[in-house]
Amino acid sequence: MTARSGYRIRRRVQFYEVDSAGIVHFSWYFRYMEEAEHALWREAGLSIAPADKAVGFPRMSAAFDYHHPLRFEDEFDVSIRIAAMSDKTIRYTCELTRDDVKIATGTLTVVCVSSTRPGEPMKAVSIPAEIARRFAVEE
């Protein structure tokens, strides 16, 4: 299987995603980015949360810059790519576009942790080789 560096999904704004001003509420952009991240993992033949998980990938950092609004019924694309990968972290960059208009740009950094029991602290661990080899950093 070829290592994946990026992926794109197509979405349509739903009514429940807009605020009282009729534009997409800022919090939805993070959901769109996460949806694209999960699609990237599926495209690589993986699940970010398999039933028999030995590791997890909690979020360390997430940010968005907003350039233009999205409104109800707008169709748009969410593109995500792996910008950097270390032994224990993956950093994604994300871009939302409508036609050729840049709507928003964001970043997301996740860290690989050993699966823990409730009440135990999470511990950063190396990304398992069988996961790391499925992804590539896009230059």
Image (tube, rainbow, N blue to C red):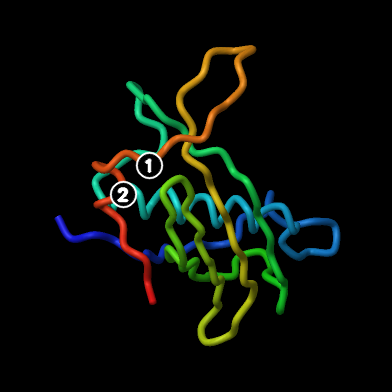
Q: Which residue is mark 1?
A: 127
Residue in the image at 48% along x and 49% along y? 89
Q: With 99 as the anchor, is 55 left or right in this view? A: left
Q: How many marks?
A: 2
Placement of the C terminus among the 4 image quadrants: bottom left
In the rendered image, the residue lying farthest to the bottom is 100
Is residue 62 depicted above or below 126 in this figure? below
Identify the image quadrant of the N terminus.
bottom left
When the figure is inspected, residue 11 is found, relative to residue 68, above or below; the finding is: above
- Mark 1 nearby-residue class (10 Å; few <14, some 14–19, many ≥20): many
- Measured from the top left, where is residue 52 in percent x and y? 33, 21
77 or 109: which is nearer to us?
109
| Image x and y of residue 39, in percent | 38, 52
* Residue 18 visible in the displayed image: yes
Q: Quadrant of residue 48?
A: top left
Q: Pointer 2 and pointer 1: residues touching (CB < 8 Å)? A: yes
